[in-house]
Amino acid sequence: MSDREPSRRWWKRTIGRRASGIFALRTGYYPISRPPRRKLWRPPLRASLLLLLFGVALAAATIAHRRRLETRFGASVVENSSTPLAIQRIRHDLEGMDLDEGSLQRELDTRLAAVDAQKSSEFYLVLDTKAKKLSFRFGDRLVREAPLTVGEPRPIVSASGEKVAPAPLSGAFTVRQKLERPAWKPPAWIWEKAGKPVPKPLSEIRGGLGRYVVVLADDVVLHSPPPPESPLQGAKPGSYLAPEADLAAIWKRIGTETRVYIF
């Protein structure tokens, strides 16, 4: 017994007392305490479902709106490619005119020529006798617009003595001349229409048609207001009158190659 006791004491001394701390932890139960983690806020399930439904509805509305825009744009492109706005306006204006076949064809040709002029890089004049407007344009740009006075047509006397009203002037012209204060000899009927005595012999009046005169065709001009000493008051019959300030503004841009479209 004495031999066993020393051995037992040795066991207790070497194993029991000298066990390491790791060994003690593994052989015992020790709860490990950790600091609680901070959790992110989570919306309620109902709110999440509402947000999801709102997003789906918004996406569907966006897609539907885009399709509507594409449909409208496609229809607009097809309509404009087949009947441009200018052509639609020409058709609308011609529908309200009481013209024979020849006059209608001339009117249509003039308006189409004016539309083609918008594609050019040149200055040109448009005399719209229905809207009573003068437009000075460069390509498709409107440079200046002014009121236009259309002179009443002078009746044509036939061989039988019957007075026939001439057809209104329309068509595409090229400026023949541009004159500044040209001398003009008013005919006797101009004096008579103005209620003034007819001078004998008839004399020329310096600037009788106004300061600016643009010759378009035989006896057809575009002119500024005549002076007080002229028997002509207003537009020359069969011609056109525009304010002097507007003609002065575009005067330097008008030449003998400038196109004029009258309709």
Image: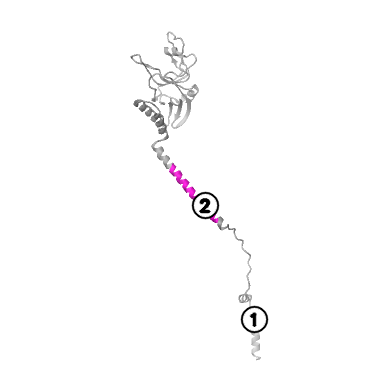
- Residue for badge 1: 16
Q: Is residue 263 left or right of residue 54?
A: left
**10 Å crowding of disc 1: few (<14), some (14-19), many (20+):** few
Residue occupying image coordinates x 55% and y 56%: 48
Per the picture, the main secondary structure of the magenta-coloured stretch is helix
Please name whichever residue, 252 or 37, is drawn nearer the observer in this view of the structure.
Answer: 37
Q: Amino acid at mark 2?
A: Gly
Q: Could you tell which of marks 1 and 2 lies nearer the N-terminus?
A: 1
**10 Å crowding of disc 2: few (<14), some (14-19), many (20+):** few
Residue occupying image coordinates x 49% and y 50%: 59
- Residue for badge 2: 55
Percent from the top left, x then y, of residue 140?
A: 44, 32
Percent from the top left, x then y, of residue 4?
A: 64, 89
Q: Residue furthest left?
A: 159
Q: Is residue 8 left or right of residue 129?
A: right
Question: Is residue 187 visible to us here?
Answer: no
Extent of the magenta region: 48-72
Secondary structure, mark 2, is helix
Residue occupying image coordinates x 44% and y 15%: 183
Q: Residue furthest bottom?
A: 1
Secondary structure, mark 1, is helix
Percent from the top left, x then y, of residue 50?
A: 54, 54
Q: CA distance from mark 1 to mark 2?
A: 69 Å
Residue occupying image coordinates x 47% and y 47%: 64
Percent from the top left, x then y, of residue 232?
A: 46, 15
Q: Is residue 48 above or below residue 130?
A: below
Q: Amino acid at mark 1?
A: Gly
